[in-house]
């Protein structure tokens, strides 16, 4: 029998900057759904990637004096690092700059052009560069882009247009016949109202810049970034090159996107597919936005949260759990450190962590670690077993409806019930009389089997925790956790538990705001890297230190500042702060140890140009001789950003 297939996608993110917690949220949601469908035994394809073309990226790269591909390569290395650290199980990562994608875009464009749905005309319009969108005067809000509120620019070009208007009636009928296509329902109504106002044909080529895919029938033009980007969903499953794979996964089961890009995915994308004669995706879900401490994330406010810093401090599962548990998928949600810490302590350390710890400890203490189902049951056991069965069915139903936090709440109700079962059955009292041995064995079996079931159910949310639970229960970790195993009684008699460390140490918060987790102290929230990147234009508020006493030009001239290129980097063992860098300065290569490890990953450093004090006397740090120092700006709030000189030859003097 062929397995059902499930194809899920995230938006492909712009590599104009590092990703923040909002992007991590969307990808974590998609990952939990992909994992859930794998646990159902389905054949899953989970795609994410990067949307690399367009004027915005071209301008960012030229500001830095590097080519667009050099610019995006670096940022995409960070995307991939983030997904790895967050345990995202995507099956592929599509980059729109790849040849496989260029071919799909050019083929599709040619096909739609040849059938007469694309035409050329002169166009003058108001363009929003950050959104890569043209607007009509009447669509502007206070003269600004209605999507992002930023100023628009007048642009004039000869362009090709895609006949969206021709498909307006078809679209309205399609939406009427497929009421579940756009979710949640509120977004569906918004889209219907938008289309009813009249669809304009879409300008799908540009001549004012060249960072894009060339239009095959008119080489002066590049393809509009959204027309290019949406097609990633076809390239990712080998459209045009592997029919078997393509037909296995198309139509997509779910395009998960943020609410601001529902329009592109539910109007433009279906019409592109219709023009190509293709089947429609089954569902587009527009999730809500994450705000931070009640405030919209913004680089000027300096409240853009870097997920890598959070993962360093709290671990990936804690962040995933918080995002999935705390936020209703269709609504906006709030991120706050305090709420994160309370959630982790209450749900993961207390409820789940203690249940495992108590159960395994008692099995060791009373039965030498051996789990036995002695079959001496009482009424209270029935209660637990019924709850297991109803939890599982409620969980599956909630996950199928994308009510992820409801599914999590259901599992935690089972965990709480199991903790209560310990109090009700009082194993420590049973242990006092050998006549109760069989009953005690049964009680502890029920607890261990509940934990086995919980481990399978939580895997989509906290995937590194489930193997830890299995290992402590003495079970072999399967390659794939399967929902068919979430039935009571599958835990084999004679299994021997292996007590381990607490799966979630409690997070202590000190008076000065530091956290202590598993004996390690974290001074402050790690720097919001994404904020720092852009803070070059809009400074974050700094703690200003007094200026040092005056020096002369001669004093300054003693410093030899050079551009160096980092050619290798690694963390210094046993140090939280230090990275060991190999830096090329002209012909010379030297080792520099730098205290930037809380702000930059070793992988992010390689290939980066830094500014080095080249004539500083060598010093030993953690036993390593460091020859020079690299310059960085630090504001005393825990933000640190390296001074750099992209595109300048190594060895160049800095004056
Ligand atoms: O729009 N809260 O890319 P993008 C929750 N390249 N989610 C957020 C968020 C927040 N504060 N901020 C961003 C693009 N997101 C296009 C997509 S797809 C063919 C092309 C998430 O880098 C959310 O999912 O601007 C949103 O839709 C997406 O990131 C936008 O990412």
Image (spheres, rainbow, N blue to C red):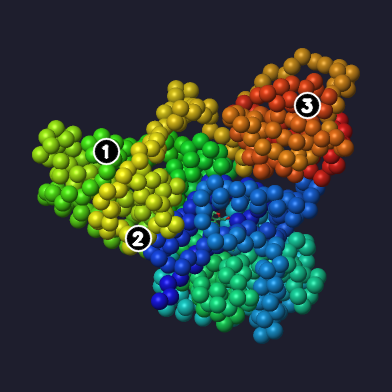
The percent coordinates of residue 84 (x first, y second) are 56, 49
Q: Quadrant of residue 343?
A: top left
Check disc 1 and report the residue beneath it: 368
Question: Vertically, is 555 above or below 608?
Answer: above
**What residue is at 75 percent from the left and 44 percent from the top?**
607
Circles 2, 1 touching at the beta carbon (< 8 Å): no
Pick the front one: 480 or 581 = 480
Which residue in the rendered view is the most extreme toward the bottom? 115
Q: Is residue 476 left or right of residue 513?
A: left
The percent coordinates of residue 615 (x first, y second) are 83, 24
Check disc 2 and report the residue beneath it: 483
Residue 627: which numbered mark, if any?
Answer: 3
Confirm if mark 2 falls within 8 A of ligand 1: no
* Secondary structure beneath label 2: helix
Q: Quadrant of residue 623?
A: top right
The percent coordinates of residue 395 (x first, y second) are 32, 58
């Amino acid at each position: 029998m062929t397995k059902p297939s499930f194809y899920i996608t995230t938006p492909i993110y712009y590599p104009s900057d590092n990703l923040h917690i909002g992007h991590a949220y969307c990808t974590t949601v998609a990952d939990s759904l992909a994992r859930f469908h794998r646990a159902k035994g389905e054949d899953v394809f989970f795609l994410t990637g990067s949307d690399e073309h367009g004027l915005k990226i071209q301008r960012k790269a030229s500001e830095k004096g590097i080519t667009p591909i050099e610019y995006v390569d670096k940022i995409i290395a960070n995307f991939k690092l983030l997904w790895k650290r967050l345990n995202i199980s995507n099956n592929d990562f599509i980059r729109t700059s790849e040849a496989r994608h260029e071919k799909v875009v050019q083929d599709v464009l040619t096909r739609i052009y040849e059938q007469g749905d694309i035409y050329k005309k002169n166009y003058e319009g108001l363009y929003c560069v950050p959104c890569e969108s043209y607007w009509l005067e009447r669509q502007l809000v206070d003269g600004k882009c209605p999507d992002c509120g930023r100023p628009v620019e007048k642009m004039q070009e000869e362009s090709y247009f895609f006949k969206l208007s021709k498909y307006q009636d078809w679209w309205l009928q399609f939406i009427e016949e497929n009421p579940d296509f756009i979710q949640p329902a509120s977004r569906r109504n918004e889209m219907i109202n938008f289309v009813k106002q009249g669809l304009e044909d879409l300008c799908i080529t540009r001549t004012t810049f060249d960072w894009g895919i060339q239009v095959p029938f008119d080489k002066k033009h590049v393809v509009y970034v959204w027309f290019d980007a949406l097609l990633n969903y076809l390239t990712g499953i080998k459209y045009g090159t592997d029919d078997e794979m393509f037909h296995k996964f198309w139509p997509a089961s779910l395009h998960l996107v943020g609410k601001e890009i529902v329009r592109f995915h539910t109007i433009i994308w279906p019409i592109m597919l219709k023009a190509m004669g293709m089947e429609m995706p089954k569902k587009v879900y527009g999730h809500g936005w994450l705000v931070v401490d009640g405030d919209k994330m913004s680089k000027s406010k300096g409240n853009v949260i870097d997920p890598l810093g959070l993962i360093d401090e709290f671990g990936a599962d804690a962040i995933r759990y918080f995002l999935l548990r705390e936020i209703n998928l269709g609504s906006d949600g709030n991120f706050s450190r305090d709420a994160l810490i309370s959630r982790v302590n209450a749900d993961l350390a207390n409820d789940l962590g203690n249940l495992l710890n108590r159960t395994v400890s008692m099995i060791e203490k009373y039965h030498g670690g051996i789990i036995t189902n002695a079959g001496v049951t009482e009424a209270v056991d029935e209660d637990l077993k019924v709850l297991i069965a109803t939890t599982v069915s409620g969980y599956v139903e909630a996950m199928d409806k994308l009510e992820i936090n409801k599914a999590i709440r259901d599992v935690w109700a089972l965990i709480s019930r199991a903790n209560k079962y310990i109090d009700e059955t009082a194993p420590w009292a049973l242990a006092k009389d050998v006549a109760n041995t069989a009953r005690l064995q049964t009680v502890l079996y029920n607890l261990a089997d509940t934990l086995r079931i919980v481990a399978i159910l939580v895997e989509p949310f906290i995937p590194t925790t489930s193997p830890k639970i299995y290992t402590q229960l003495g079970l072999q970790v399967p390659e794939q956790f399967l929902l068919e195993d979430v039935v009571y009684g599958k835990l084999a008699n004679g299994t021997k538990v292996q007590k381990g460390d607490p799966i979630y140490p409690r997070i202590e918060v000190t008076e000065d705001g530091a956290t202590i987790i598993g004996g390690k102290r974290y001074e402050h929230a790690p720097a919001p890297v994404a904020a720092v990147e852009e803070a070059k234009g809009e400074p974050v508020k700094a703690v200003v230190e007094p200026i040092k006493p005056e020096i002369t030009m001669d004093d300054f001239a003693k410093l030899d500042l050079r551009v160096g290129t980092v050619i290798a980097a690694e963390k210094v063992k046993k140090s939280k702060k230090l990275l060991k860098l190999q830096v090329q300065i002209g012909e010379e290569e030297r080792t520099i140890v730098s205290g930037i490890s809380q702000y930059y990953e070793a992988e992010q450093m390689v290939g980066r140009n830094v500014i080095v004090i080249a004539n500083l006397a060598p010093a030993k740090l953690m036993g390593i001789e460091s020859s020079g120092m690299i310059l960085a700006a630090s504001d005393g709030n825990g933000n640190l950003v390296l001074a750099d000189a992209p595109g300048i030859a190594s060895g160049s003097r800095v004056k």
